[in-house]
Image (cartoon, helix red, strand yellow):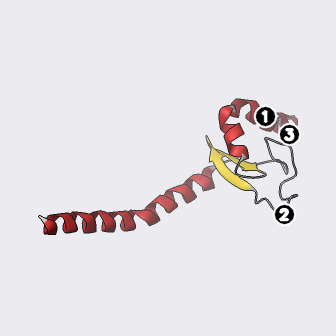
Amino acid sequence: MKNITKFTCLAFGIALIASAPLAGFAEEKQAEKAKPYPLDTCIVTGEKLGADTSMKPFTFTHEGQEIKLCCKSCQKDFKKAPAKYLKKLDKTEKPNKK
């Protein structure tokens, strides 16, 4: 019985290690397709990205749109009401469509 348990753990570990690079590849592909973020400010706070050197800007993709925030903690507010914040992006794109 101990051999079966060891074998199962070993097989699971190998599968996990083998699939890790594939997960990173999927994220890279998704990031390549995302529309670029047009602002130089955080979409949540309005703070200039990188202005506070103690906070590292946080970037992620939401429904095919790259989003940049002044810090990771802003993501919680963004996730509560993404439509509210995405409207700010719509306002920046409309003048370019004239």
Q: CA distance from mark 1 to mark 2?
A: 28 Å
SS for callout 1: helix
Whichever of labels 3 and 1 marks the residue nearer the N terminus, that label is 1
Quadrant that contains the N terminus: bottom left
Write down the residue under mark 1: 90
Quadrant that contains the C terminus: top right
Q: CA distance from mark 3 to mark 1?
A: 10 Å
Residue occupying image coordinates x 76% and y 35%: 85
Work out whether 92 lies above or below 3.
above
Q: Residue furthest left?
A: 1
Q: Quadrant of residue 16?
A: bottom left
- Disc number placed over residue 53 in the picture, else none: 2
Work out whether 8 lies above or below 34.
below
Asked whether the beta carbons under mark 3 and mark 2 sit within 8 Å of each other, the answer is: no
Whichever of labels 1 and 2 marks the residue nearer the N terminus, that label is 2
Q: Amino acid at mark 3?
A: Asn
SS for callout 2: loop
Asked whether the beta carbons under mark 3 and mark 1 sit within 8 Å of each other, the answer is: no
91 with respect to 84 (left or right): right
Q: Nearer the viewer, mark 1 or mark 2?
A: 2
Write down the residue under mark 3: 96
Spot occupied by residue 23 in the image (x, y as percentages of width and height): 47, 59
Q: Amino acid at mark 1?
A: Asp
Q: Nearer the viewer, mark 3 or mark 2?
A: 2
SS for callout 3: helix
Spot occupied by residue 32 in the image (x, y as percentages of width and height): 62, 56
